Image: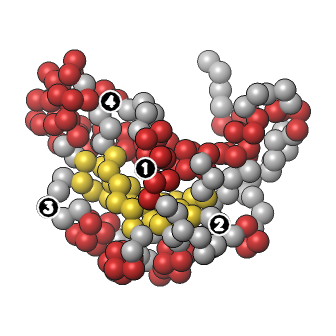
């Protein structure tokens, strides 16, 4: 049985992807304290250019992101943060507000020309559109974090904020709703607590 906190070395022995797996999962942590190091705009673009290639239903690609970097933008974001998330978010070089476009299907003519016949179904069923947008944008946000880690950044995802306030500040006049926040930068590992327990395969998985 694998160690509860860290996979045994033999698990990755001989695996040509072992360094990548360590970087994006096994040694990566959720950070809440940050070094005073800038995250260049070009790096954010590079991460997006890879993460956008992850699969979504009908290639719908509903995620939208606002990267909060400037002092003025941080003050706008501050209005919607819950107290426990203020310090770590204000200290982060970048906070990505991930959102989902409720009218993602209106871009099917470019993203999925083979599926334009499905546009009417989404227009007629807002609940269907909401569920598809939320689910696939959440997938895309996960892809984004994986690529960010692979590119050398640390991530601090969180959901402790007032969605209506953030939506009014950053998505007003659009069909986009906020999903969750990701603080991005170069973390300070000295303040991390021990990694917590993860379920083993036999605890939560079943092969039918």
Q: What's the distance in space between the residues labelled 2 and 1, CA to CA? A: 20 Å
Closer to the observer: label 1 or label 4?
1
Dots 1, 4 in contact, CB < 8 A: no
Q: Which residue is mark 4?
A: 59
Secondary structure found at label 2: loop
Which residue is tagged 2? 187
First in sequence: mark 4 vs mark 2: 4
- Across and down, in percent, residue 153 comes to 60, 56
Mark 2 vs mark 1: which is more N-terminal?
A: 1
Kindly check if marks 4 and 3 are in contact, taking CB atoms under 8 A apart as contact. Answer: no
Mark 4 against mark 2, which lies toward the viewer?
2
Quickly name the residue at label 3: 173
Q: Mark 1 or mark 3, which is nearer to you? A: 1
Judge the density around disc 1: few (<14), some (14-19), many (≥20) Cα neighbours within 10 Å. few
Quarter of the image that includes the N terminus: top right
Q: Quadrant of the C terminus?
A: top right
Whether residue 91 is visible: yes
Q: Which residue is mark 1?
A: 45
Depth check: give the residue in front, 40 or 100: 40
Gap between marks 4 and 2 measured at Cα = 33 Å
């Amino acid at each position: 049985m694998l160690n509860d906190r860290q996979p045994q070395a033999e698990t990755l022995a001989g695996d040509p992807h072992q360094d990548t797996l360590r970087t994006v999962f096994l040694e990566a942590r959720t950070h809440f304290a940050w070094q005073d190091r800038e995250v260049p705009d070009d790096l954010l673009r590079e991460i997006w250019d890879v993460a956008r290639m992850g699969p979504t239903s009908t290639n719908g690609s509903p995620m939208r992101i606002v990267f909060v970097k400037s002092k003025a933008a941080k003050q706008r974001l501050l209005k919607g943060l819950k107290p426990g998330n203020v310090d770590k978010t204000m200290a982060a070089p970048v906070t990505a507000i991930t959102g989902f476009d409720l009218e993602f299907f209106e871009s099917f003519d470019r993203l999925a020309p083979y599926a334009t016949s499905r546009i009417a179904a989404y227009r007629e069923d807002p609940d269907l559109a909401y569920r598809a947008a939320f689910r696939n944008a959440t997938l895309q946000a996960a892809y984004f974090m994986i690529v960010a880690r692979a590119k050398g950044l640390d991530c601090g995802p969180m959901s402790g904020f007032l969605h209506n306030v953030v939506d009014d500040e950053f998505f007003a006049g659009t069909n986009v709703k906020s999903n969750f926040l990701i603080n991005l930068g170069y973390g300070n590992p000295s303040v991390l607590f021990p990694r917590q327990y993860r379920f083993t395969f036999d605890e939560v998985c079943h092969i039918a």
